[in-house]
Image (cartoon, rainbow, N blue to C red):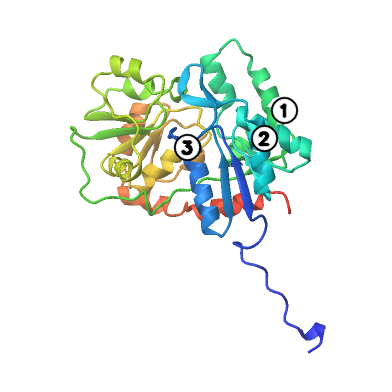
Amino acid sequence: MTPDDAPAAQPEPMAQRGPQRFLIVTDAWAPQVNGVVRTLEVLGEDLKAMGRQVRYATPEGRFTLPLPSYPEIRLALFARKSLEKMIAGFRPDAIHIATEGPLGISARAICLREDIPFTTSFHTRFPEYVRARLPLIPEAAVYRFLRWFHGPAYRMMVATPSLQHEMEAHGFTNVVIWSRGVDVGMFRPIAGATLPYRGPVWLYVGRVAVEKNLEAFLSLDLPGTKVVIGDGPARASLEQRYPDAKFLGSRTGEDLVRHYAASDVFVFPSRTDTFGLVLLEALACGVPVAAFPVQGPLDVIGDAPVGALSEDLGEACARALETPREACRVFALTRAWRTCTEQFLANLPPV
């Protein structure tokens, strides 16, 4: 057989192509429970299932101080040397910097000094976050910092096309899509699941903080019971102001899934989330969504018949209550994680 007669080489399967050793750098990590942490955890699990090696550089085991006004978030300081040792020892093929905190800034500096390509992602609407806590800092200054941080990255990943267009309008030039999915095996309807509260049950899951706009939900005149799962700096004051609501703190695993599955409507009052992973988790459990028609809900749900979006959140709740639960589950089944992981891989620099 001549070389010309030989069968064409077959492309390697996705699990074998490209980078094999991944370092994910994040200032957001357990015990925090939020969409950023869950996204990075699932990404690592999926990469490992595809045959990759994955390590995380997180605040765990490092010297940390609490974030002012948000003590649940601890920032790792003086981490540069330990990060250098980690990178030198592991020799990652791909470095992804997920957050703009001290760990992310240190990793960025090392990559630039050593001429190591890296990618970043934009998970939290920093300008709105800063404005809610430090209104004297100009929004333009925050965007300058973000352009400085993400500018040298090979790619800056965002979850939705609308956020991509928004960031490009603010002068970002390296923005690509890395969408989000849901584990439809874990998050699922549970027949007969109930909660010991008067129905209908209106559920919120997420951080309990000022930027989440929870008062827009808690102040609604709704029948039944409002349930809040999550923790954060605003919890104590909101519990005092809204004693009829049930504040259950953080829930994880099967316990969280049962609370989703036993609820009637998932209410998402945030106007600042870039995506809202909890929306997909609720839908996967067969729970319709009520939200404002803003970035996040519009990108995740759009005009799909799986809930209601309205500037009148109470009206959205009433319409969502009439939504067939089966439609929510069917919609969520189209949002599997593996497609998102392959999208992440396609955004990496060549090796």
Residue linked to disc 3: 35
Q: Residue at x 35, y 41 (%)?
A: 288
Q: Give the mark nearer the N terminus: 3 vs 2.
A: 3
| Label 3–label 2 contact, CB within 8 A | no
Q: Residue at x 37, y 42 (%)?
A: 282
Q: Which numbered mark, 3 or 2, is in the foreground of this view?
A: 2
The quadrant of the rendering that contains the N terminus is bottom right
The amino acid type found where label 1 is placed reads Trp
Q: Is residue 233 above or below residue 321?
A: above
Disc tally is 3
Crowding near pointer 3: few (<14 within 10 Å), some, many (20+)?
many
The quadrant of the rendering that contains the C terminus is bottom right
Q: Secondary structure at mark 1?
A: helix
The amino acid type found where label 2 is placed reads Ala
The answer to which quarter of the image holds residue 84 is: top right
| Label 2–label 1 contact, CB within 8 A | no
